[in-house]
Image: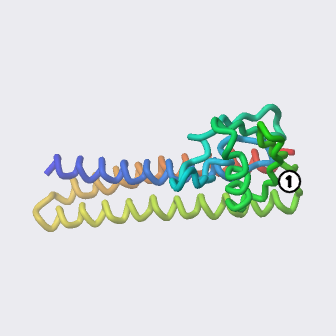
Amino acid sequence: MNEEIELILDLAEEQMKESISRLESVLSKIRAGKASPQMLSAVKVDYYGAITPLAQMANINTPDSQTISIQPFDKSIIGDIEKAIVEANLGLNPMNNGDLIIINVPALTEERRKELVKQVKLETENCKVSIRNARQRSNEEVKKLAKDGLSEDMARDAESSVQDLTDKFIVVIEKHFNDKEKDVMTI
């Protein structure tokens, strides 16, 4: 029975870690007015019929906090890259000088910052729901074991362990939210 409880706890922790990594990925794409190569991570370019991530076909740099420069490995596709950035609907206006694509990242208005904080809050709430769902599934598994002969004390301890795990990950989510909110609201 102890092995089954350990398996349930390990599975719950794995699901919760996946939720956190998904949240981190989403939050990294929410820009805070500072230029970051991560902002272009969703851009895919049609490269001779194959949809290819921009990072695999160009060097992406941030020479300063308001500028992103993209230097394609193959200069003949610079127009395709520019088109892909516009079509990605990121609110960025690429400028092509023949060798590089330069993107000036505009500073965010106060209203836009507040919208981004709402978006961050929504994403963190979705992550909390995912964590709670993992907790619920684990507790249901523990209850099934209790019906199959697991002692009440062991079942209660297992549920308590699942709750401790949940609380630990909720604290991590709150920290991510507070850090991103501070990042977005800082001018």
Observer-nearest of 8 and 187: 187
In the rendered image, residue 155, in percent from the top left (x then y), is placed at 23, 57
Farthest residue, direction top: 63
Q: Label 1 belongs to which residue?
A: 108
Q: Quadrant of the C terminus?
A: top right
**Which kind of residue does numbered mark 1 sit on?**
Leu
Position of residue 75 measured from the top left corner of the image (x, y, whole percent): 69, 39
Residue at the spot x=34%, y=53% of the render? 12
Seen in the picture, residue 171 relative to 129 is either above or below; the reply is: above
Residue at image x 77%, y 37%?
Answer: 99
Q: Nearer the viewer, residue 98 or 170?
A: 98
Local secondary structure at mark 1: loop
Q: Is residue 69 left or right of residue 139?
A: right
Q: Is residue 109 left or right of residue 171?
A: right
Q: Is residue 6 above or below residue 46?
A: above
Bin the neighbour count of mark 1 within 10 Å (Cα to Cα): few under 14, some 14-19, many 20 and up. Answer: some
* Residue 128 against residue 161 in the figure, above or below: below
Horizontally, residue 171 falls left or right of residue 140, namely right
Report the coloring of the rendering.
rainbow
Residue at figure coordinates x 71%, y 56% from the top left: 83
